[in-house]
Amino acid sequence: MMIDIKDLCITFGAGNHQIHAVRNANLQVAEGDSYGLVGESGSGKSTILRAMVGINARWTGSIEVDGNTLTPKRTVASRKHMQMVFQDPYGSLHPRRTVDDTLSEPLVIHKMDKREDRIIRILKEVGLGPEFRFRYPHQLSGGQRQRVAIARALILEPRVILLDEPTSALDVSVQAEILNLLSDLRKTHGLTYIMVSHDLAVVGHLCSKIAVMNRGEIIEEITEEQMRTGEVEHDYTRQLWTASHGYDRAALESFREFA
């Protein structure tokens, strides 16, 4: 098992102001698989990813990646093998650094050799040629910026990629291109993905198994087949499934809040 998370709890604040962002989350992802986390904003999806990469340090439970138990304080070596692609491709890239600067930095930090060759190769893999090396983020489209962000995550040759709504800031036509690229890269490099989204249809495009989250809890885990047919158990999951099929006024009026 590449990823094994048990009884994960994440809190913010203290005392009467403490918020339980994630409660007793359990999930397993086999090597080479793509696993989805879906739910509304604030359901705890991204919070799990941020705990895994060390951005959120206040958690209890167990997180194992490739047989190694992670602690809230991550080592440089552990960061190399698990990388994250963020939602906003413009906000995650330094506006005053070229693509070359952005891709060179992790190679320098991790003391990897043949840096120029690695940069040119990874740009080609994400669908950008070497002519993009010395451009700045403002000279790129949204889709091109996200390709650079994916290249930055891949250049360290990680085994696990965490995807935090990687297409939500992009036009619909570009979303499909990025999802297809991610699918191809996973197969080519044998990567393991966890992908977060509020859109069940987007996650279903890439993931074979999906955990549905509501108010910090995983309420149901569904398969790719269940995602296609809508044969799910929890009413909240059924509501998400209905919403993923486009606007339906009658269905919308029947939606309710789940406590």
Image: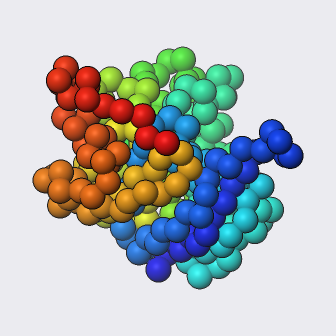
- Report the residue that reaches farthest toward the right: 15
Q: Is residue 155 above or below residue 199?
A: below
Q: Position of residue 32 (x, y in %)?
A: 38, 70
- Report the residue that reaches farthest toward the left: 229
At horizontal 40% and vertical 52% (from top left) the residue drawn is 212
Of 191 and 119, the residue lying toward us: 191
Of 37 and 231, the residue lying toward us: 231
Taking the image as shown, residue 227 lies to the left or right of residue 98, namely left
Q: Position of residue 14 (x, y in %)?
A: 85, 46
Q: Is residue 240 above or below residue 63?
A: above
Q: Position of residue 70 (x, y in %)?
A: 70, 71
Would you say residue 214 is visible in this rendering?
yes
At horizontal 43% and vertical 70% (from top left) the residue drawn is 29
Q: Position of residue 130 (x, y in %)?
A: 45, 38
Would you say residue 148 is visible in this rendering?
no
At horizontal 52% and vertical 31% (from top left) the residue drawn is 89
- The structure's colour scheme is rainbow
At horizontal 47% and vertical 57% (from top left) the residue drawn is 218
Taking the image as shown, residue 217 lies to the left or right of residue 168, namely right
